[in-house]
Amino acid sequence: MTKYKLEYIWLDGYTPTPNLRGKTQIKEFDSFPALEQLPLWGFDGSSTMQAEGRSSDCVLKPVAVYPDGARTNGVLVMCEVMMPDGVTPHSTNKRATILDDPGAWFGFEQEYFFYKDGRPLGFPTSGYPAPQGPYYTGVGYSNVGSVAREIVEKHLDLCLAAGINHEGINAEVAKGQWEFQIFGKGSKKAADEMWMARYLLQRLTETYEIDIEYHCKPLGDTDWNGSGMHANFSTEYMRTVGGKGYFEALMAAFEKNLMDHIAVYGPDNDKRLTGKHETAPWNKFSYGVADRGASVRVPHSFVKGDAYKGYLEDRRPNSQGDPYAIASQILKTVAEVPAGAKKAAA
């Protein structure tokens, strides 16, 4: 028997964006534990905005398990929050009620800023560094520094060690801003892995006395890019059949549901989706081939040979968004368009 360090991780009840929480228990197993071997566990919901002090018990239900490369015999356990009966989902448990489809594939592009001493990493104590331009996919100390590169490389290794489908990293447009990408088949799986990747990043940066700033426009109304979490998505029908008529009907459905999408695409998105800095205005829907200023970017591969099939990129979700809610809303809108639909029928 081996003692394993089980880190139970969940989302708290803070709004509009929940925080990650975690605590450790030690359990013995013959080998690395399977999900079904992991017990329910309780916590004090009065300290996480999920219960009152006079009735504070909440329950953690394991839903996904990953190796923890930062610990000897470490286990990362993604959990849903349940009521004391261990069966009824807590009102803050969004994962339990989202739409899910294993045939729907999601690729999330998580942008964020490194922050230290109240400003982006690499910013001077007053004023701004040189304007944007050399930082995106940059190399060299003056463009990306040294600590940031070390962190993103370690984060990449931790994600891969956990079996998370991490697909890449790059420095972003603003100084101190970076991005990583997570891909998953099924909305729950993709979102689980994004939340776990966020957890690993935030835990890692504790050592460097650096915070992760997820706000979509931390530098306000300035000539510095905000942070998004672009959602690349496809369904089995989009990948295998598609067609121009279906695509046009799908875009009509996205336009009709504009405000439903904006409502779950992250707080303060009006500050980011201004029509500047590679964004479309938050209150207008648009799409275009290779257009990073549109709500939905249509890849060249999607329209190649008039096939109109493959994946699309919704560029409106922001860096603070909840991937559970984002993926679910995309699936809700997709479900409104029947297979073989034509634009006139949308």
Image (tube, helix red, strand yellow):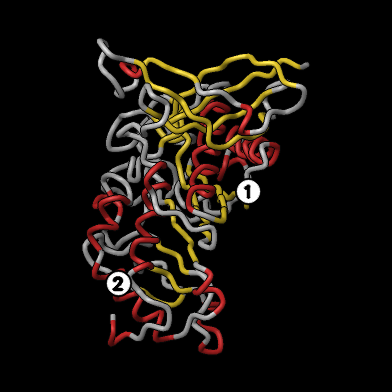
- Viewer-closest of 38 and 5: 38
- As drawn, the residue found furthest toward the top would be 54
Q: Is residue 210 left or right of residue 293?
A: right
The residue drawn where x is 44% and y is 56% is 230
Give above or below for 246 relative to 196.
below
Specify the label residue 253 is tagged with. Answer: 2
> Which quadrant holds residue 16?
top left
Looking at the image, is mark 2 or mark 1 nearer the viewer? 2
- Residue at mark 2 to residue at mark 1: CA–CA distance: 30 Å
Give above or below for 128 relative to 237.
above
> Which quadrant holds residue 287?
bottom left
Image coords of residue 55 (percent x, y): 28, 14
Category of crowding for the residue at label 1, using alpha-carbon neighbours closer than 10 angstroms: few (below 14), some (14–19), many (at least 20): some
Q: Is residue 173 left or right of residue 17?
A: right
Split into 4 quadrants, where in the image is the C terminus? bottom left
Q: Secondary structure at mark 2?
A: helix
Split into 4 quadrants, where in the image is the N terminus? top right
Disc 1 marks a residue whose amino acid type is Asn
Image coords of residue 198 (percent x, y): 51, 37
Image coords of residue 176 (percent x, y): 48, 40
The residue drawn where x is 76% and y is 17% is 2
Specify the label residue 268 is tagged with. Answer: none
The residue drawn where x is 40% and y is 79% is 247
Q: Residue under label 1, please give it.
A: 165
The residue drawn where x is 39% and y is 86% is 245
Q: Secondary structure at mark 1?
A: loop
Disc 2 marks a residue whose amino acid type is Ala
